[in-house]
Image (spheres, rainbow, N blue to C red):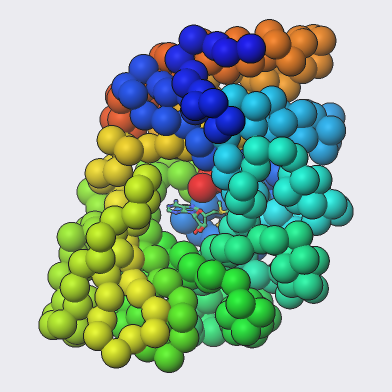
Amino acid sequence: MEYENTKSHSSERPVIYDNHGRPITYLRLAVTDRCNLRCFYCMPEEGVKYLAKSKVLSYEEMLRIVRVLSELGIRKVRITGGEPFVRNNIIHLMKEITELEGIEELNITTNGILTGKYIREMKEMGVKSINLSLDTLDKQRFFEITRRDEFDIVYKTLFQLIEAGFSVKVNAVVMDGKNTDDLIPLTELARHHPVSIRFIEEMPFNGEGSHYPTLHWNAKRIVETLRHQYPDLYKLEDEKNSTSYNYHIPGFKGNVGVIAAFTRSFCGTCNRIRMTAQGELKTCLYDDGVLSIRDLLRAGISDEELKTTFLNIFQKRAKDGFEAEARRSSSVTESMTTIGG
Ligand code: SAM
Ligand code: SF4
């Protein structure tokens, strides 16, 4: 069956387009809201109030959602959280997702603490790209940022992932007064290793609302700092739907990039939707959830009805993160650990 707003090309799979003509092909699936770190830009020190187990989507529910979305044209899934590996047997769900017809790519974003022991299984199931969050190369600073003394294991995991042949992206949130001295040491990782270092503008998703009136370290300032150190730095052509602006430094094995998550300059090509651990659908990082898919599943919705529901919602997508934020019923107060990044 062909739905409105989808186009299929003979044997090719359908593509869903939103009301702004953007194809929707990418799902970010938060599999838990729990985490073994307490990064201060993401969570308060005491943690966030975790969801009761019954409120979190089961693996069966997640798999059904991904299957239905894959039939509508979602091709790429990124597993995120909270920390994905703190949820029992997540590797099994990942394998099942890779076996769904239509899913061409499964990736994961992780903090690297429990990741090492799943390297072989992830290779075997065909995971290609791993985003590892690492904001500093200084052990003490790592402790101050994450409130946990786990630097050594994360650093070791970084090299294990590179050695195993994954395409590794290091995500580093740039925090005024905290880790701006790390911009150059982190970039230096890309001199000898084929990694992509991505500096992310800090967003107001720390579970407590924004803690700064303006962002002092925006993408522009980050790039200027890099250019000052590496005058030969040059911009690479943006990959389609990329949220990062990527640069290369001659002689380096890897690349460096910035993600303007706060200034939101990538919305025009946004191809992604998000599912929170409790089954809330977000069609923009900055919206406060547009529908509880969990409630629909638990009320007995059929696959066909679910498809129609998704398609209707994709026709009401905010044009950009500013419009999505303006439509919210509350100001931004949630933690990234529930959204998934
Ligand atoms: N726990 C995993 C991790 O840290 O990689 C996956 C979930 S985490 C919420 C996903 C990404 O969101 C991480 O790269 C993290 O650095 C980023 N993030 C969390 N809070 C953020 C904030 N306030 N501003 C910008 N990025 C943030
Ligand atoms: Fe945990 Fe990731 Fe949030 Fe850090 S950024 S507290 S590792 S969910």
Answer whether residue 5 is visible to the viewer in this image. yes
Answer whether residue 333 is visible to the viewer in this image. no
Asked whether 247 or 109 is in front, the reply is 247
Asked whether 43 or 242 is in front, the reply is 242
Q: Position of residue 123 (x, y in %)?
A: 72, 68
Q: Position of residue 18 (x, y in %)?
A: 41, 21
In the image, residue 328 sits, relative to residue 52, either above or below, namely above
Q: Position of residue 221 (x, y in %)?
A: 18, 64
Tell me what residue is drawn at x 62 percent, y 47 percent.
104
In the image, residue 262 sits, relative to residue 221, either above or below, namely above
Q: Is residue 190 left or right of residue 32?
A: left
Q: Position of residue 27 (x, y in %)?
A: 57, 38
Tell me what residue is drawn at x 52 percent, y 83 percent.
140
Tell me what residue is drawn at x 28 percent, y 35 percent.
268
In the image, residue 303 sits, relative to residue 8, either above or below, namely above
Q: Is residue 311 left or right of residue 52?
A: left
Pick the quarter of the image with the N terminus.
top right
* Labels in figure, total: 0
Q: Is residue 274 left or right of residue 149?
A: left
Which of the 4 quarters of the picture holds residue 253? bottom left
Asked whether 244 or 307 is in front, the reply is 307
Which of the 4 quarters of the picture holds residue 120? bottom right
Tell me what residue is drawn at x 26 percent, y 81 percent.
249
Asked whether 18 or 53 is in front, the reply is 18
Q: Is residue 235 left or right of residue 31?
A: left
Which of the 4 quarters of the picture holds residue 217? bottom left
